[in-house]
Image (cartoon, rainbow, N blue to C red):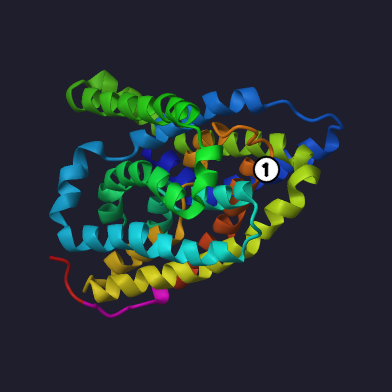
Amino acid sequence: MTALRDRLETQQVKIYFGTIIVAVLLSLAIPATIKLEATINPALALMLFVTFLQVPLADLGRAFLQLRFLAALLFANFVAMPLLVLGLIQFLPPEPMVRLGVLFVLLTPCIDYVVTFSHIGRADAKLLLASTPALLVLQMLLLPIYLGLFLGEDAADLVHIGPFLHAFVWLIAIPLVLAALVQLGAAYNAKAKTFSGLLGLLPVPATAFVLFMVFASVVPQLSLTFDSALRAVPIYMAYAVSAPLIGWGIGRLAGLNTPAGRAIAFSAATRNSLVVLPLAFAVPNAMPLLPAIIVAQTVVELVSSLFYMRIMPRIGNGRIAAVP
């Protein structure tokens, strides 16, 4: 079972691209728009549950013991990256919905497949994994604040607190609590541990399933949003080049060792596109523009990750310093 899970994780980029291609071809082959919107949220809830199940929620305290790494990680994701994003969105057209989509995805650091990508890229994946609960909690707390700062009055018009809280509770908070309960049960019960192990096979298939449904649902409507969504792509490309360099530089300034510095670079570069989709769907009149803008970042990121995993192991072969 462990071997199968490792194989799925190692091949996940190929699986995701294959899924996207199948979804696009299927949606183009069927003349009528595929009505999948109603099934996306339940699939997202499942995906987020099995994703959170892989996050070591009990290790949150352990992450705080790595103070230098954690400080660099949080500074990179919640100070440096927002400043970078603030600069990049100035090149977007003044369309609030377009800017909202870009902000949704670029202000939220990834907590799932970044761990596998960083492992393949010879970063300190275990240290990054232990820090993912802190990343999750902080991004959910800070995202509304950043949206208010960067969008001003438009944020209040687009992000209504009621639907936002409903999406957060049912699609993020409840799956997170359930994942914590399963982890707790697995620590004390053999059957629960076996059940948890079986669920551990699902993150990649569940993510692929969500990608399939999102792309199959959005692609038939792209003619309505293509131009607007396309304008975000150069911003995503600029981010994909700049973010890992900034993250690596922050790791150097923090005096981290090479694998830990790579982990900061991976975290800065990789965003939480699928996790924020439930929040995006809570925005009135979000379909199809907002999901299209968000999944466009997913495609750019998956392509960029192929380069990250090849280039990152060649960077900083010597030690910078020891993590305390």
- Where residue 276 appears, as percent x and y from the top left, is 49, 40
Identity of the residue drawn at 37% across and 24% down: 174
Residue 198 visible somewhere in the drawing: no
| Span of residues in magenta | 312-320
In this view, the residue farthest toward the front is: 153
Identity of the residue drawn at 68% across and 27% down: 36
Please tell me whether residue 111 is drawn above or below residue 85 in the rendered image.
above
Q: Identity of the amino acid at label 1?
A: Leu
Instruction: State left or right for residue 1 relative to residue 250.
Output: right
- Where residue 114 appears, as percent x and y from the top left, is 42, 53
Tag 1, which secondary structure?
Answer: helix
- Where residue 48 appears, as percent x and y from the top left, is 44, 33
In this view, the residue farthest toward the right is: 31
Instruction: State left or right for residue 322 relative to residue 176.
Output: left
Identity of the residue drawn at 27% across and 28% down: 180
Magenta run includes residue 314: yes
Quadrant of residue 69 within the rendered picture:
bottom left
Quadrant of residue 192 within the rendered picture:
top left
Please identify the quadrant where the N terminus is shown: top left
In this view, the residue farthest toward the bottom is: 318
Magenta run includes residue 123: no
Q: How crowded is mark 1: few (under 14 residues within 10 Å), some or many (20 or more)?
A: many
Please tell me whether residue 290 is drawn above or below residue 72 in the rendered image.
above
Please identify the quadrant where the C terminus is shown: bottom left
**Residue of label 1:** 289
Identity of the residue drawn at 72% across and 25% down: 35
Residue 320 visible somewhere in the drawing: yes
